[in-house]
Amino acid sequence: MTEIPTTEMSPLPKKAKGPRHVVVMGISGGGKTTLAMMLAGKLGYVFAEGDEFHSQANRDKMHAGTPLDDDDRAPWLQSIQDWMTTEARVGHSTVVTCSALKKRYRDVLRGAEGTTIFVHMAPPVELTAERLNARKGHYMPASLLDSQVATLEELEDDEAGFKVVSAGTPTEILAEVLLQLKDL
């Protein structure tokens, strides 16, 4: 298996108790949905596609090639946090995709009940651009890639999680992520 370089960030105490939320984050086209669906299936966690929480106005704005601003993102992030809390209250752990490009966005998600861990998908930007250009029927055009790259803030020391910087196969990436998550 190809080794996938990762950078560990401030891990949680080993084996955190209670529901966990794994937020698969990063720019559009980075492989978030593919990994998150595989991860949820493997772990038996409830899965949600963060894009489904966007308002129609947000979708229309992105489809038109206009980047979202913080005011656009605030209700979207809150609705994801609310969903995570609702699931935690009934004892469910979750896997959710969300770009979570800025620390303050991730802070909203960390406000959910339970323990939140971030998996930052960060394949080479050239690969991400190829994926976006090949994607059909998605409201996020490749023209917004540069704005997402410019907006992205790396995980900080007080955020539990790690970065996956590989262009490996989904199965290889899943194996590495599972290894990283097992001790969190």
Image (spheres, grey):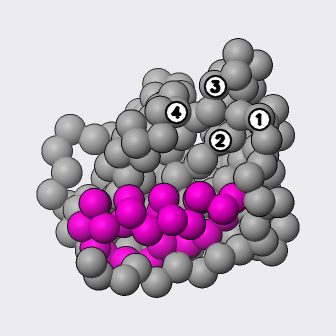
Q: 25 left or right of 109?
A: left
Specify the quadrant that holds the N terminus. bottom left
Amino acid type shown at disc 3 = His
Amino acid type shown at disc 4 = Tyr
Residue at screen point 29% across, 81% down: 2
Residue 112 position (above or below residue 143): above
Q: Are marks 3 and 4 in contact (CB under 8 Å)?
A: yes
Residue nearer the viewer, 129 or 111: 111
> In x, y percent, where is residue 53?
53, 28
Residue nearer the viewer, 64 or 87: 87
Which comes before the other along the chain, label 3 or label 1?
1
Label 4 to label 1: alpha-carbon separation? 13 Å
Residue 28 position (above or below residue 54): below
Residue 8 position (above or below residue 60): below
Q: Can you see residue 64?
A: no
* Badge 2 element: strand
Label 3 to label 4: alpha-carbon separation? 7 Å
Q: Which residues are magenta?
A: 161-184
Which comes before the other along the chain, label 2 or label 4?
2
Label 2 to label 4: alpha-carbon separation? 9 Å
Which label is found at residue 21? Answer: 2
Residue at screen point 55% across, 72% down: 163
Residue that mark 4 sits on = 45
